[in-house]
Image: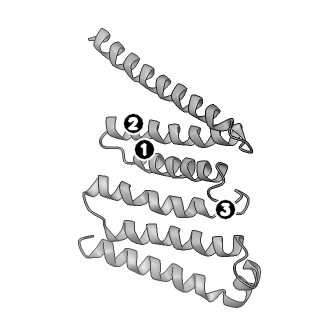
Amino acid sequence: MISKVFRRLTANFVFFTGLLFMVMGISFLLGFVEGISRVSIFLSFLFVVIGAFFAMLAVKLNKSVVYLFFAALFMMIGIFLLLSALQIIDLPLSRAWPMLSVFSGLALLPVCWRKHGLLRKRYIVSSCAFVILGCVLLVFSLKMAPFSFRDFIYNWWPIPLVLGGLILVLGAIGSNKGDR
């Protein structure tokens, strides 16, 4: 019994170590490309590996969807950092921080699908709220609006109240009607 558990743990450790070595090798190979930082490539692949580790935990532990959320979140962050490091997306991280909210909202959808087998309203409402919040903050972070976020809040402060109330009402409606 102990030897079977030990073999399974050893196989998982070897698999994860092999995956880590492959990612490190690929990151260092991509780091040789002119003008690309090896550290940023390694960091992006590290996020992808952490996401893969959480995905493996989500598969092994069928009942825990928290691991699936973190798997999706870390993989999206890693892919975004990789595209940014390869200069495919020309967006510095100091201005792209609202993307974390967008990624969090998108990571909720596979959690709902895995937990319930379909998309439920309360997850969709929460997911949309995170995505919309991230998009609004991204507009101000990228300076696409002709005014600052402070001016927006000062002049239009009731809008977040209306949107917050709308999210709460839609969430309550979704949970009261059988949640389908």
Q: Residue at x 48, y 29 (%)?
A: 19
Q: Earlier in the sequence, mark 3 or mark 2?
A: 2
Amino acid under label 1? Tyr
Amino acid under label 2? Leu
The residue carrying mark 2 is: 57
Secondary structure at numbered mark 1: helix
Could you say which disc has been placed on residue 96 in the image? 3
Q: Position of residue 13 (x, y in %)?
A: 44, 21
Judge whether 64 appears above or below 116 on screen: above
Q: Residue at x 32, y 16 (%)?
A: 5
In this rendering, the label closer to the viewer, 3 or 2: 3
Judge whether 117 appears above or below 6 on screen: below
Q: Quadrant of the C terminus?
A: bottom left
Secondary structure at numbered mark 2: helix
Amino acid under label 3? Ala
> Disc 3 to disc 1, how far (Cα)?
25 Å
Q: Is residue 22 left or right of residue 153?
A: left
> Disc 3 to disc 2, how far (Cα)?
29 Å
**Who is closer to the viewer here, 28 or 99?**
28
Res 133 quadrant in image? bottom right
The residue carrying mark 1 is: 67
Single out the residue that lies furthest toward the top. 3
Q: Position of residue 153 (x, y in %)?
A: 70, 83
Judge whether 113 appears above or below 161 on screen: above
Q: Does the residue at mark 2 contact the one at mark 1 (Cβ under 8 Å)? A: yes
Tell me if mark 1 has few (under 14), some (14-19) or many (20+) residues whose alpha carbon lies within 10 angstroms of its own.
Answer: many
Q: Earlier in the sequence, mark 3 or mark 1?
A: 1
